[in-house]
Image: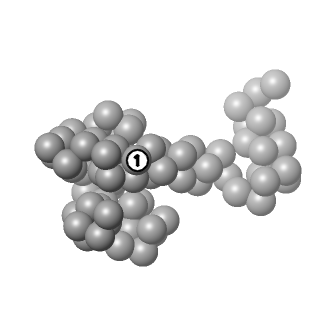
């Protein structure tokens, strides 16, 4: 199956693009790390979860969770 065919198939089955789904998984992993390890820097968590750019991580985190990673960490 070609990458394009897989992306079409995935979207038909889940109503999400593959990259949207992947980012949601990465954000959920980041939430677990933000809650459990208070000593780890947010930038370190972003890189560990697969984001190469901290500003992109912050933007995607806010899209999914409707709050910034630092506010999420304070609340949990």
In the image shown, does 65 or 50 lie closer to the viewer? 65
Quadrant for the N terminus, please: top right
In the image shown, does 10 or 74 lie closer to the viewer? 74
- Give the image location of residue 22, x and y in percent: 56, 44
**In the rendered image of this protein, does residue 37 appear above or below residue 14?**
above
The 10 Å Cα crowd at callout 1, few under 14, some 14 to 19, many 20 or more, is: few
Residue denoted by label 1: 32
Q: Is residue 61 left or right of residue 55?
A: right
For the point 44% across and 51% down, the residue is 27
Q: Is residue 73 left or right of residue 8?
A: left
Q: Is residue 52 left or right of residue 14?
A: left
- Give the image location of residue 68, x and y in percent: 30, 68
Secondary structure at numbered mark 1: helix
Q: Quadrant of residue 52?
A: top left
Q: Is residue 18 left or right of residue 9?
A: left
Tell me, yes or no, if residue 53 can be seen here.
no
Quadrant for the C terminus, please: bottom left
- Give the image location of residue 36, x and y in percent: 31, 46
**In the rendered image of this protein, does residue 17 appear above or below residue 51?**
below
Query: How many numbered markers are drawn?
Result: 1
- Give the image location of residue 17, x and y in percent: 67, 52
Tell me, yes or no, if residue 72 can be seen here.
yes
Outermost top residue: 1
For the point 73% across and 42% down, the residue is 7
For the point 76% across and 27% down, the residue is 2
Q: Give the colour scheme of this rendering.
A: one colour
For the point 39% across and 52% down, the residue is 31
């Amino acid at each position: 199956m070609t990458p394009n065919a897989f992306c079409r198939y995935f979207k038909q089955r889940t109503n999400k693009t593959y990259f949207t789904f992947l980012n949601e998984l990465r954000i959920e992993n980041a939430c677990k790390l933000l809650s459990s390890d208070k000593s780890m820097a947010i930038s370190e968590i972003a890189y560990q979860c697969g984001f190469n750019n901290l500003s992109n991580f912050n933007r995607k985190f806010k899209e999914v969770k409707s709050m910034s990673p630092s506010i999420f960490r304070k609340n949990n």
